[in-house]
Amino acid sequence: MTKGNLLYEGKAKSVFETSNPDELLVYFKDDATAGNGEKHGIIQGKGVMNNKISTFFFKQLKDRGIATHFIEAVSDREMLVKRLDMIKLEIVIRNIVAGSLVKRLGMAEGTPLSVPIIEYDYKSDELGDPMFNRWHIMALNLATINEMNAIEHISLSVNTIMRSILKAKNVDLIDFKLEFGRAKNGEILLADEISPDNCRFWDSETQEKLDKDRFRHDLGGVEEAYQEILNRLTL
Ligand code: 5GP
C-alpha cells in the first residue's frame, strides 16, 4: 500500500488515496473544533488515541457481525479503510439526555430515555448540520427507505454492543454520532470513527465526563479523559 494524494481534509482527520483505488488511508489529527468550527484547539496525542480507540471498537463490532469500512491500523495515526460512497448524514443515537437534547426537550442532563432516540443531521458546514427526518432525506435523495432501515438497524445494534462493552469498563454510553457509506456492491457499511470526539462517555459511578465535552466546555483534563477511555478499553 502506497500513500497517494490528499482526497479530503476534515477538521479532525485527513483522507488520502492509496495505490489501491478501493482503499483509502485515514490520518487522525490532534486538531479539535467545536460549535460548528467556531472554537479550534489542539488536544495533544488525540490522533493517536482516537486511531487506537476506533480500531478497538471496529474490531469488536466486526467480531459481532457488524460490517464496517475498517481494514487495519497501519501506523499510530493511520487507518486503512474501504473506499465508500458516503451518505451525507450524521446519525445520532441517544440513551441519556445530554448536549443539544437538554435544550430541545427542556429536560435535565443525565435523564435516562426509555428507549434510544435516533436523529439525523444533514452534513453541511454552511447550514450548521441541520436536523433532518426521513422525508427530508427522501426529498433530497440522500438515501432510500431500505438504506435508512439498514442504517437504523445497524445503529441500534452498534448501540447495544458498545453499551455492553463499555458497561464492563464502568463507562456509560450517553450518546454518539455515526456515519455510513455504500460499498461497491451497495452494502451499507459503518464508516468514520468511534472515539471520544463523537461519543459521550461518562464514568458509571461518578458521572465524570470522559469525552470531547471537556474540550467543548473548557472543563480541563481533556487529554487525560481520552487516555482514560483508551486505558479502560485496552489495558
Ligand atoms: P449533540 O447533538 O448533543 O451536540 O451531540 C450528540 C452526540 O453526537 C454527541 O455524542 C456528539 O459528540 C455527537 N455529534 C453530533 N454532531 C457531531 C459532529 O458534527 N461531529 C462529531 N465529531 N460528533 C458529533
Image (cartoon, rainbow, N blue to C red):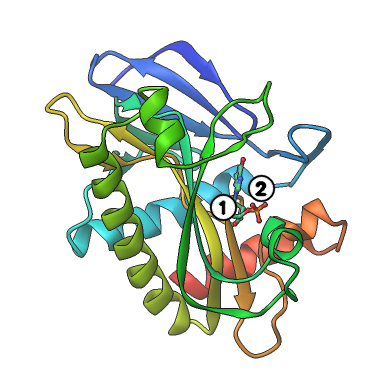
Q: Relative to residue 154, is residue 16 depicted above or below?
A: above
Q: Relative to residue 99, is residue 150 depicted above or below?
A: above
Q: Which residue is drawn at 30% across and 47% down?
A: 151
Q: What residue type is labelled 1?
A: Met
Question: Residue 188 at what x, y percent from top left?
Answer: 23, 39
Q: Which mark is residue 22?
A: none
Q: Which residue is drawn at 38% across and 59% down?
A: 57
Q: Residue at x 84, y 57 (%)?
A: 217
Q: Tell me the residue that label 2 is attached to.
A: 45
| Along the viewing direction, whichever of 13 and 38 lies nearer the viewer | 38
Q: Tell me the residue that label 1 is attached to.
A: 49
Quadrant of residue 2 within the rendered picture: top left
Q: Residue at x 46, y 76 (%)?
A: 166
Q: Which amino acid does label 2 sit on?
A: Gly
Question: Residue 204 at what x, y percent from top left?
Answer: 60, 85
The answer to whether mark 2 and mark 1 are in CB contact below 8 A is yes
